[in-house]
Structure formats: structure tokens, C-alpha cells
DNA sequence: ATTGTATATCGTAAATATACGATAATAGTT
DNA sequence: AACTATTATCGTATATTTACGATATACAAT
């Protein structure tokens, strides 16, 4: 037979799936885009820009933070969110390798 | 105010989220990896390699096909699945632009 | 201390995703 | 036609995600 049946998924596969899960909602794509184009923002400012209630935006921010895509910095009364560049680049690279859209020896 | 509240997400945001959704499960990551590393395979061969039942694998293949990540080619009795390179590269590029991990003028 | 502002968390309803046994559909074989 | 092999679909149970009102928490200002 061509393959041997695996019993479980690898850590790497789970990590990549989790990264993709972070981006698997238009609101979270929108948040990343807004932060990329306008710089760091507070939760309140993002609520203004998105068609969602404050708790919902907060929930999305939590997912992005826990996924390592965003950084949160206390700023007096409020919290400013920004893109976690390094981590995003790292995941993107893993992704490209997995998807075979980058030259890494194996090619496709 | 910094933003005007949008009523809906853009077509582009939804498309990228859908692409990410396709990759937001370890089994689908594993399928892509297997096809990339071993070339085109049948559903049955993938069932052998994965810790999932045949209907579940078939369901994942359907999701990947409908998301444009895989191609299906009838081959006698069976169906051979392969990676839809062009489409994956296209989505990856959109992704990179959105995430700001590629030089496109805007930078981050 | 009290008030106001900003954000997170709780509780929960509704929608979506996941997995798989049972079964249908399709195509090759005898 | 009957049988076999391969894949898809159905039905459904369970888990996860999503959204938001209500409420709690944290901090600044008065």
C-alpha cells in the first residue's frame, strides 16, 4: 500500500490549522486589514469600523491575540492592538512551504 | 471618528476567509501535504493514510474541491485528486498582500 | 469615593462544522 | 444482468463557532 494509516495529526498540522482558523472569518480578516492600513487601534475604534457589537469584536480580538496574530499594549484607560508581524511572517512561511507555493527544495 | 461603520464585509474578505476555512482543519492540511509530497491520489488511498473514515475524507475532499484547492480527475473506476496549483498560488498571494507580508507598496 | 469610559467575561441562542454508519450512485468485471 | 470496487450522499449525533445583551472589571478623572 502507498501509505500507512496515521493515528493522529502532527503538531505542525494542528498549528497551521489553528493559524488558518484565526483567519477563517471575514471580521478577523477585516481587523487585520484595518490594523495593517491604519496602524494600531483600540477595541472601540474597531467596533466603530465593523458591523458587529463590542463583545463580538472583543471576542475576535481575543482569538487573534491567542493565535499570536495580534499584540495588545495597555495605554492608560484603553488597549491598543497591533499586528504581530514576526509571528504572522513565520506562519505565512510555514504555510507557503506546506502549500508548496515557495521554493524549498521539494517543489511541486 | 477614525472609521465609518461598515454594514457588511467585502467580497474579498469573504473569499479570503473561505480560503482560510478550507485550511482550518488538520485533516485538510494533511491531505494537501500528502498530495504535494506524493502526487495525485484517490480517495481510498487518502483514507488509508488518514485517521478518518471514508465518508469523512470524502467530505473534506468535497470542501477542498469546492474551495478550489483541489482538482478531481476521473480515472476509470476511481477519481484521482491533485493540488490546484494556480488557484492556491493566487489565494496565497492575496493572503500575503492582506497580511502585509509581501512588498506591495503599502508595506506594514 | 463616585462617576465615566473602555474592555473583558458570562450566559446563551442559533448557526455551522465534524464525524461516521448506512446507503446510494457510478463504473469496471465476469 | 449480477457482482465488486470506489466514491458520494443521507441522516444524525456531537462539538464548535458566532453573536450579543447583561454584567463585571480596570483605570482615569473628578
Image: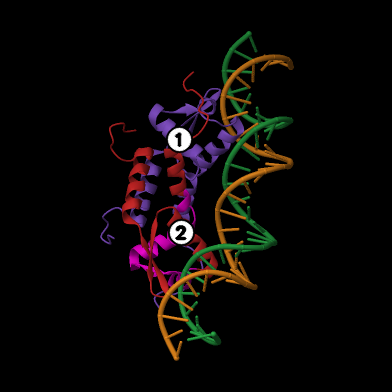
Chain colours: A purple, B red, C orange, D green
The magenta stretch spans residue B27: yes
Q: Is residue B53 above or below residue A102?
A: below
Q: Residue at x 49, y 60 (%)?
A: B60
In this image, D27 relative to C29: left or right? right
Q: Residue at x 56, y 23 (%)?
A: A77
Q: Quadrant of residue C2?
A: top right
Q: Which residue is labeled 1 in the image?
A: B10
* Disc 2: CA contacts within 10 A as few (<14), some (14-19) or many (>=20): many
Foreground of the two, D11 or B53: D11
Are callouts 1 and 2 both on one chain? yes
Specify the principal SS of the magenta part.
helix
Callout 1: helix, strand or loop?
loop
The magenta stretch spans residue A62: no
Q: What stretch is highlighted in magenta?
A: B21-50
Percent x, y for residue A43?
A: 53, 29
Q: In this view, does B41 lie above or below B69?
A: below
Q: Quadrant of residue D14?
A: bottom right
Callout 2: helix, strand or loop?
helix
Q: Residue at x 53, y 42 (%)?
A: A63
Percent x, y for residue A5?
A: 47, 73
Chain letter of disc 1?
B
Q: In this view, does B43 lie above or below B108?
A: below
Q: Which residue is labeled 2 in the image?
A: B28
Chain letter of disc 2?
B
Cα distance between the residues tagged 1 and 2: 26 Å
* Disc 1: CA contacts within 10 A as few (<14), some (14-19) or many (>=20): few
Foreground of the two, C12 or B58: B58
Percent x, y for residue C18?
A: 56, 58
In this image, D16 relative to C10: left or right? left
Closer to the N terminus: mark 1 or mark 2? 1
Of the 4 image quadrants, the one containing the C terminus of chain B is top left
Amino acid at each position: 500500500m502507498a501509505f500507512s494509516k496515521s493515528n493522529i495529526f502532527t503538531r505542525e498540522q494542528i498549528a497551521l490549522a489553528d493559524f488558518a482558523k484565526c483567519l477563517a472569518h471575514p471580521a478577523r480578516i477585516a481587523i487585520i486589514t484595518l490594523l495593517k492600513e491604519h496602524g494600531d487601534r483600540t477595541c472601540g475604534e474597531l467596533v466603530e469600523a465593523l458591523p458587529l457589537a463590542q463583545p463580538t469584536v472583543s471576542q475576535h480580538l481575543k482569538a487573534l491575540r491567542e493565535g499570536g496574530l495580534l499584540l495588545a499594549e495597555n495605554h492608560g484607560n484603553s488597549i491598543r492592538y497591533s499586528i504581530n508581524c514576526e509571528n504572522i511572517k513565520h506562519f505565512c512561511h510555514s504555510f507557503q512551504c506546506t502549500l508548496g507555493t515557495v521554493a524549498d527544495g521539494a517543489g511541486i
